[in-house]
């Protein structure tokens, strides 16, 4: 549906059509169940670790607080996509209102920006802990932790808000997006006139939210590796145990973002449609589950508490069954 025309005769777009969806015949309920299961697992895993970190005083340390921030972002990012995907899979008409589309653009871009910034702050925290262990407690104060958490969330919010506002102000000459969710660059390509301002700002915002955090991560890990090679076996073990999940998370997320940027900027028609859809969704669907599983299994304190919770629940069930049998 198109709204009334303006003075120049250009029509205002009131909805977008998501053209990447295709007829799945009888498989749409299977896809629905797979996505629903993935979403439930993601929510449960992230909520569990957030609650564990918040409820255990032994985990009220900078590293775990930054981890908690990361899990909150995974919860937020997955909620910005999964319910929308579930509705679209069951729907026969794949349209979305312009207001909701721009809201989704904001949510997903904000999620991606916070993810990179959060990983950069975590790498800085590990750099201080491994390279300056004696000064760590004096340098990583509670005020500094609060400041770094603000750095994780506030600059990406401002950058993405401005990006989304600029895109929402564009006069559009089309409403077809060749994706399964709303994408800012796809909307910009539908503009009726020159989008130089949008492109320049998006380039600046992208350079601040991706290359800057990644540069911080590379710098800190170069310093960490230098200390590891010249340090004791205990230092190397500490570095491996705390840095492995962080590096795995960074590589996993960077791969997904890289392909999404590649797909948005270049013609990928030679790539099978199903593969394009999977890879465009990868960093939004796999990362929110990958992080809690990776950190839950590799961080000894979190893993220990999770095992105690599970064993405690199993013991309660066994006790309850014995009591019922005695009755």
Image: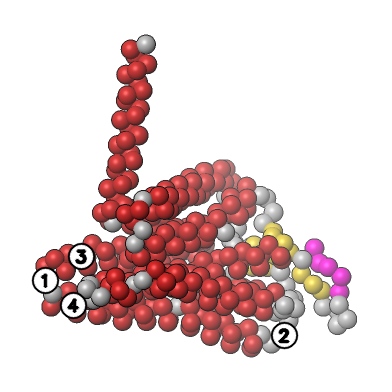
Q: Is most of the magenta stretch helix, strand or loop?
A: strand
User: Badge 1: how crowded within 10 Å, few (<14), some, or many (20+)?
Assistant: few
From the image, tell me which residue sits under label 4: 227
| Residue 2 highlighted magenta (yes or no) | yes
Q: Distance between the residues labelled 4 and 2?
A: 54 Å
Q: Residue furthest top?
A: 327
User: Badge 2: how crowded within 10 Å, few (<14), some, or many (20+)?
Assistant: few
Q: In which quarter of the image is the N terminus?
A: bottom right
Q: Can residue 272 be seen in this view?
A: no
Disc nearer the start of the sequence (4/2): 2
Q: In which quarter of the image is the C terminus?
A: top left
Q: How far apart are marks 3 and 4 (CA)?
A: 12 Å
Left or right: 150, with 28 as reference point: left
Which percent across, then down, holds residue 43?
48, 50
User: Badge 3: how crowded within 10 Å, few (<14), some, or many (20+)?
Assistant: some
Which percent across, then down, holds residue 246?
32, 66
From the image, tell me which residue sits under label 1: 232
Q: Marks 3 and 4: CB-CB under 8 Å?
A: no
Q: Residue 193 carries which label?
A: 2
Disc nearer the start of the sequence (3/4): 4
Q: Which circle, 2 or 1, is nearer the viewer?
A: 1
Helix, strand or loop at mark 2: loop
User: Badge 4: how crowded within 10 Å, few (<14), some, or many (20+)?
Assistant: some
Q: Which circle, 4 or 2, is nearer the viewer?
A: 4
From the image, tell me which residue sits under label 3: 238
Quarter of the view holding residue 234: bottom left
Give the residue at x 17% y 64%.
237
In the image, is residue 208 above or below residue 15? below
| Residue 105 highlighted magenta (yes or no) | no
Disc nearer the start of the sequence (1/4): 4
């Amino acid at each position: 549906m198109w709204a009334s025309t303006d003075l120049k005769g250009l029509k205002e777009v009131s909805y977008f059509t998501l053209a990447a969806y295709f007829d799945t015949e009888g498989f749409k309920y299977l896809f629905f169940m797979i996505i629903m299961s993935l979403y439930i697992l993601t929510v449960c895993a992230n909520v569990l670790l957030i609650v564990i970190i918040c409820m255990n005083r032994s985990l009220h340390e900078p590293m775990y607080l930054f981890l908690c921030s990361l899990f909150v972002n995974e919860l937020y990012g997955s909620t910005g996509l999964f319910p929308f995907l579930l509705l679209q899979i069951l729907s026969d008409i794949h349209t979305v209102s312009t207001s909701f589309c721009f809201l989704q653009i904001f949510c997903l871009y904000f999620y991606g920006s916070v993810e990179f910034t959060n990983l950069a702050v975590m790498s800085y925290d590990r750099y201080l802990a491994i390279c300056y262990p004696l000064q760590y407690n004096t340098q990583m104060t509670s005020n500094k932790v609060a400041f770094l958490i603000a750095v994780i969330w506030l600059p990406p919010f401002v950058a993405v808000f401005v990006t989304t506002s600029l895109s929402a102000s564009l006069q559009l000459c089309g409403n077809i997006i060749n994706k399964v969710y709303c994408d800012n660059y796809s909307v910009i390509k539908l503009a009726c006139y020159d989008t130089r301002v949008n492109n320049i700002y998006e380039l600046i915002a992208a350079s601040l939210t991706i290359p800057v955090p990644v540069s911080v991560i590379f710098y800190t890990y170069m310093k960490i590796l230098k200390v590891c090679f010249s340090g004791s076996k205990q230092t190397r073990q500490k570095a491996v145990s705390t840095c492995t999940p962080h590096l795995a998370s960074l590589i996993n997320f960077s791969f997904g973002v890289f392909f999404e940027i590649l797909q948005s900027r270049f013609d990928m028609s030679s790539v099978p449609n199903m593969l394009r859809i999977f890879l465009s969704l990868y960093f939004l669907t796999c990362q929110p589950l990958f992080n809690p599983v990776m950190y839950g299994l590799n961080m000894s304190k979190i893993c220990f508490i999770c095992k105690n919770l599970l064993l405690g629940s199993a013991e309660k069930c066994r006790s309850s069954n014995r009591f019922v049998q005695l009755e």
